[in-house]
């Protein structure tokens, strides 16, 4: 996810909600790297027995990981120099303070000074530094934006409420791609990487249901298959509602207008709900064709085949426009066992993909016709 590993002298900022697993992940990372290079884990939020208890729970009590419970920045850097640490973990940057400044830990001046001191320390000693950052209610890193500007890499730890799965998203990376995702599952032994990320979002029922389709997205450098659900319900009274979870609500309103104008499907007198299963958020327009398919399926109360996957952008004039990484999306759909794909004509593969029937569409009314021929009665 970092594009080749931790770079010596780099500074990484990891943000996430409380309790999401930041300390668990960094304990596992520190214990793994400590077998090859000296690693100092400095915590100003937990005591040594608490950290040792977590390490024991994760089965890491024998790892040669150096622990330090300290909130003074100078002492932390002195200990890192003394042990010639190859990696320094500071948990968290909002709880440490520099003795050269007045003010409590977490104040703007303290945050800026501590971050700058740690960046200078990393560059002068070739020590990789990982800072843990708190997240506000709005989901952004607490404190001044100077933290993000100073560091080399910014990662966000995300999770849907109540889910055992975690996503780490790279939003800045000076040494690699800034659009990578890493998927993890939280287990009793800590975080474990998920190799087949598409399987996380494809827990579909055995029998296909009306309004449920599979969209092929491309998020953070990799194709990803996600289940998209729609519910169209006739309104007998009141104002029809439009709701979208994990998708752009404004784009949903646009697609409803395109369906009415170019495919003669009027949903003005119906409640429309669209949901991206699994808590993932996708903003790319390549999900347009899947949203339309889910709406048509729910409106007609006819399920699409279980082996169908879709992607494509829909324009205001009703055309189905090509999207980036079309062939990679089709290959991923075939690898996941899908047998039929609806895609823009311009995204047809250069050579046939084994086991996948790719049906090209150029307009939304043609796509609706293909869907009606594929849907079960």
Image (tube, rainbow, N blue to C red):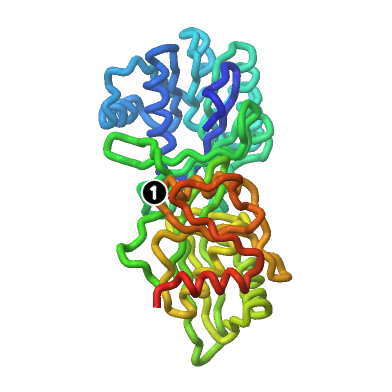
Numbered-mark total: 1
Residue 328: image location, x then y, percent = 55, 44
Question: Looking at the image, can residue 19 be seen?
Answer: yes
Left or right position of 21 against 242: left
In the rendered image, residue 67, in percent from the top left (x then y), is placed at 39, 20
Location of residue 169 with respect to 313 vertically, above or below:
above
Residue at the extreme front = 351
Which percent across, then down, holds residue 128?
Answer: 55, 19
Q: Which residue is painted at 60% across and 17% down in the image?
A: 9
Horizontally, is 244 left or right of 175 in the view?
left
Q: Which residue is mark 1?
A: 199
Q: Residue 139 or 107: which is nearer the viewer?
A: 139
Q: Secondary structure at mark 1?
A: helix
- Closest to the observer, 300 or 342: 342
Q: Is residue 102 above or below residue 291?
A: above
- Residue closer to the observer: 233 or 86: 233
Residue at (48, 24) in percent of width and height:
89
Seen from the viewer's position, the closer of residues 360 and 299 is 360
Residue 155 placement (x, y as % from top left) = 55, 37
Q: Hey, which quadrant is residue 50 in on the image?
A: top left
Q: Residues within 10 Å of mark 1 (few under 14, many from 20)?
A: some
Picture quadrant of residue 112: top right
Q: Residue at x 64, y 58 (%)?
A: 345
Q: Residue at x 54, y 52 (%)?
A: 217
């Amino acid at each position: 996810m970092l594009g080749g590993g931790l770079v010596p002298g780099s500074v990484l900022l990891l943000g996430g909600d409380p309790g999401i697993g930041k300390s668990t992940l960094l304990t596992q990372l520190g214990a793994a790297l400590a077998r090859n290079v000296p690693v100092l884990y400095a915590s100003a939020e937990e005591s040594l027995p608490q950290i040792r208890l977590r390490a024991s729970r994760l089965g890491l009590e024998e790892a040669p990981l150096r622990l330090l419970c300290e909130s003074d920045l100078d002492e932390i850097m002195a200990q890192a120099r003394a042990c010639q640490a190859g990696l320094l973990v500071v948990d968290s940057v909002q709880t440490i303070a520099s003795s050269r400044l007045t003010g409590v830990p977490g104040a703007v001046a303290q945050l800026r000074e501590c971050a700058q001191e740690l960046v200078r320390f990393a560059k002068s000693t070739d020590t990789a530094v990982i800072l843990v950052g708190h997240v506000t209610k709005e989901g952004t890193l607490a404190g001044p934006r100077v933290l993000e500007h100073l560091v080399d890499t910014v990662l966000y730890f995300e999770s849907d409420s109540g889910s055992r799965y975690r996503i780490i998203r790279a939003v800045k990376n000076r040494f690699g791609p800034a659009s990578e995702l890493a998927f993890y599952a939280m287990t009793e032994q800590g975080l474990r990487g998920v190799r087949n990320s598409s399987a996380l979002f494809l827990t579909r029922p055995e029998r296909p249901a009306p309004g449920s389709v599979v969209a092929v997205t491309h998020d953070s450098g990799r194709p990803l298959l996600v289940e998209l659900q729609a519910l169209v319900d006739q309104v007998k009274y009141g104002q029809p509602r439009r709701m979208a979870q994990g998708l752009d609500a404004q784009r949903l309103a646009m697609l409803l207008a395109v369906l009415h104008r170019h495919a003669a499907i009027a949903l003005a007198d119906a409640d429309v709900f669209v949901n991206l299963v699994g808590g993932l958020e996708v903003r790319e327009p390549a999900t347009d064709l899947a949203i339309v398919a889910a709406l048509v399926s729910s409106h007609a109360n006819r399920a699409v085949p279980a082996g169908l996957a879709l992607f494509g952008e829909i324009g205001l004039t009703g055309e189905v426009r090509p999207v980036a990484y079309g062939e990679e999306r089709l290959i991923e759909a075939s690898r996941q066992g899908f047998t039929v794909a609806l895609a823009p004509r311009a995204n047809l593969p250069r050579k046939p993909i084994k086991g996948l029937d790719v049906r090209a569409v150029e307009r939304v009314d043609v796509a609706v016709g293909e869907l009606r021929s594929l849907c079960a009665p």
